[in-house]
Amino acid sequence: MISYFKLRKQRKTFKEVRLAAKRRLISDDDILSDEKKTALNTILADAASVDRSDAAAMDSFVRTRSSLLEKLADVHGNKRKLRNFLDVLAVAFAVAFGIRALYLQPFKIPTSSMQPTLFGIHYVDRKGLEEHNGPLAGLLKIPYLSVRKAYAEIGEDGEFQAYRPLRKFGLFDETELQIGDRTYTLPGTIYQVARYLDLERRRNFTKGEVPADGWLATGDHLFVDRVSIHYLPPRRGDVIVFTTENIKSPTQPLAGFYYIKRLVGLPGDTLKIKGRMLYIKPKGAAEFRPATDFSDKFKRLYSMEGGYQGHMASELLAPGLELVVPENMYFALGDNTSNSLDGRNWGFIPRRNMIGRALNIFWPLSRRWGLVDTKPALSGKTLLPDSMGWQ
């Protein structure tokens, strides 16, 4: 019985050496020298002639051919292990980036144009958060998990002088401000800091004042489904991601290459906004119908609860104006139209610009986590804005 198990173990070791030589020939065929190929083929030929019932013959083959295989290796010991690890890592990255390019693409919501469906990078006031304390509020306060602390106490009376961006490796940029003769550093781009400090409306600060006491949150991170849009045509109500290539705004540069909005108009549609309701007349139809007749996804937007506010008429869809969507073009709006740079400003999206549909939010762990566009509006009447600049 002992001899049987010993022979079985030797056969296993013998097989491993033979397969090592065979794998080397196959995997490195294009880079092996003729001399090494000959040596490896000799090992395989010798293996074929070994009697697998002869323990001594197999033992001799393993000892001699193992050392020869080691000499034929381009790298040895730890270097070889490192190379093998890097090979595996390279394959893993190739697969991951292949999936990203062909199927699922991660995307970070940069602005508040899709609130309250999707949250962009935004400031959370400490006192305001304490009014809604709970498990998620506690999680939010963990440093660097999904937020950066934003705190500034004014050291002396002074007027806002200037700011400059500070690039930093991490979740956020930082901005350095000069107020009077002192400088303060806060998380966020110049645009974001100016927003939560309200620098557009105020210039003077008083010693002891705390203009910022809270957190800057990263915004929702989601996966974009890049596949279904090639098989299922874009539909009214879909939340889509698209490139801004060849899309121009008449009032300002478009910030960023990828945008995310809700698709509201298909080729041939005639659109108008009246009383915060979007009306659609499809190609060939005689009458306008409210957007809620075309997709249930619009019903939440017109609930006027939880921050949803319908659609604000402005620019290309100002009160009294109608807009026809050209062929091979689409029209999109943000859910937060009082604070959204969207089709009302820059017009139409070419079909070729569409990347895919928003699929699911994977970060942060908030009420919105999970499939996009499936959560009901929070209860509570929306306070309607009185201007485009209101947030």
Image (cartoon, rainbow, N blue to C red):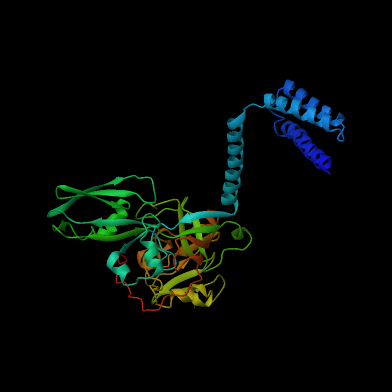
**Residue 22, horizontal then vertical, whole percent:** 76, 33
Which of the 4 quarters of the picture holds residue 154?
bottom left
Quarter-of-image position of residue 386: bottom left
Q: In the shown orientation, is residue 110 left or right of residue 284?
A: left
- Give 308 or 84, whichever is nearer the viewer: 84
128 to the left or right of 297 = left
Instruction: Determine the residue positioned at 15% across, 57% down.
Output: 204
Give the residue drawn at x 28%, y 55%: 193
The picture places residue 299, in percent across and down from the top left corner, at: 48, 76
Is 21 located above or below residue 194 in the figure? above
- Quadrant in the picture for the N terminus: top right
Q: Is residue 278 visible?
A: no
**Looking at the image, which residue is at 80% across and 37% down?**
11
Q: Residue 319: horizontal and vertical position, in percent?
A: 37, 72
Residue nearest the viewer, comparing 194 with 241: 194
Can residue 5 be seen in this snapshot? yes
Q: Is residue 153 left or right of residue 134?
A: left
* Figure check: 53 above or below 383: above
Q: Residue at 41% of width from left, 63% of height from top? A: 119
Residue farthest to the left, as pictured: 157
Q: Quadrant of the C terminus?
A: bottom left
Indicate left or right for 75 with 66 as reference: left
